Structures are given as C-alpha cells and as structure tokens.
Image (cartoon, rainbow, N blue to C red):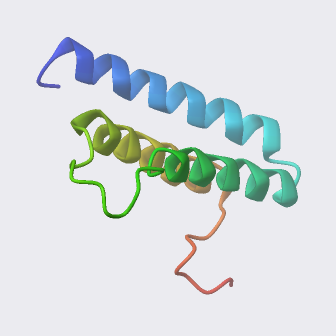
C-alpha cells in the first residue's frame, strides 16, 4: 500500500463486501438486489446534467472505483457471475 488511506480503504472495501456476501449468500435474489443497490449508488453520483460544464469531481471517480471493487468482491465471495459472463 502506498499510503495509510489506501490501506484503510482496502480494509473497508473488503469488510463491506464480506458483510454483504455473508448476509446474502443463501439467497441469489438477495445477492442480486445488493449488487443492484451498489450500482444504484454509483449511478446516483452521476446525476449532473449531461451538458454540465464541470467535469466529474475526483472523489466521484474514486467512489466509482470503490463500488466496483466491492461488487467484484461480493460476486467472488458468492460465486455470482460477472454481468458480462454467461451463467454456467
């Protein structure tokens, strides 16, 4: 880890992903709902008008990365396929 902040963010990401995975692992529907909620959180940060003269703030891009990381971990822990993959 480059900084203490990066280490803390990684620990928080993993803790949140484990909590979501453990609370939803017995129900694929609950896992899907949790993943949808993470996507909704990510989408709510993009509520700026498309013709806005301002670029997205750096924290929004960082939050997108964190939510994507949490979603990937939840999928890994619950063995849920990525959205682009075909179910086995």
Percent of width and height locating residue 37: 68, 48
Residue at the spot 36% in from the left edge and 28% down from the top edge: 10
- Left or right placement of residue 17 versus residue 2 in this view: right
User: Which residue does the image show at 27% across and 47% down from the upper left?
Assistant: 56
Please say if 9 is above or below 35.
above
Examine the rendered structure and indicate whether residue 59 appears above or below residue 61. Answer: above
Q: Nearer the viewer, residue 17 or 53?
A: 53
The residue drawn where x is 52% and y is 53% is 43
Judge by depth and name the residue closer to the eye, 12 or 52.
52
Expressed as whole percent of the image width and height from the top left, the position of residue 38 reads 60, 47
* Residue at x 74% of width, y 36% of height: 22
How many numbered circles are shown?
A: 0
| Outermost top residue | 4
Q: What is the residue that sits farthest to the left in this orientation? A: 2
**Quadrant where the image shows the C terminus:** bottom right
Residue 72: x and y, percent? 50, 54
5 sits left or right of 83 in the view: left
Q: Is residue 84 left or right of residue 62?
A: right
In the picture, residue 81 is in which quadrant? bottom right
Would you identify the image quadrant in which residue 66 lies? top left
For residue 6, side relative to residue 77 (left or right) = left
Q: Position of residue 17 (x, y in %)?
A: 58, 37
From the image, which quarter does the N terminus lie in? top left
């Amino acid at each position: 880890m480059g900084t203490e902040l990066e280490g803390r963010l990684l620990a928080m990401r993993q803790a949140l992903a484990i909590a979501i995975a453990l609370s939803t692992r017995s129900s694929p529907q609950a896992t899907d709902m949790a993943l949808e909620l993470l996507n909704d959180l990510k989408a709510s940060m993009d509520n700026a008008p498309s013709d806005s003269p301002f670029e997205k703030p750096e924290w929004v891009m960082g939050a997108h990365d964190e939510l994507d990381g949490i979603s990937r971990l939840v999928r890994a822990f619950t063995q849920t396929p990525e959205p682009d993959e075909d179910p086995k």
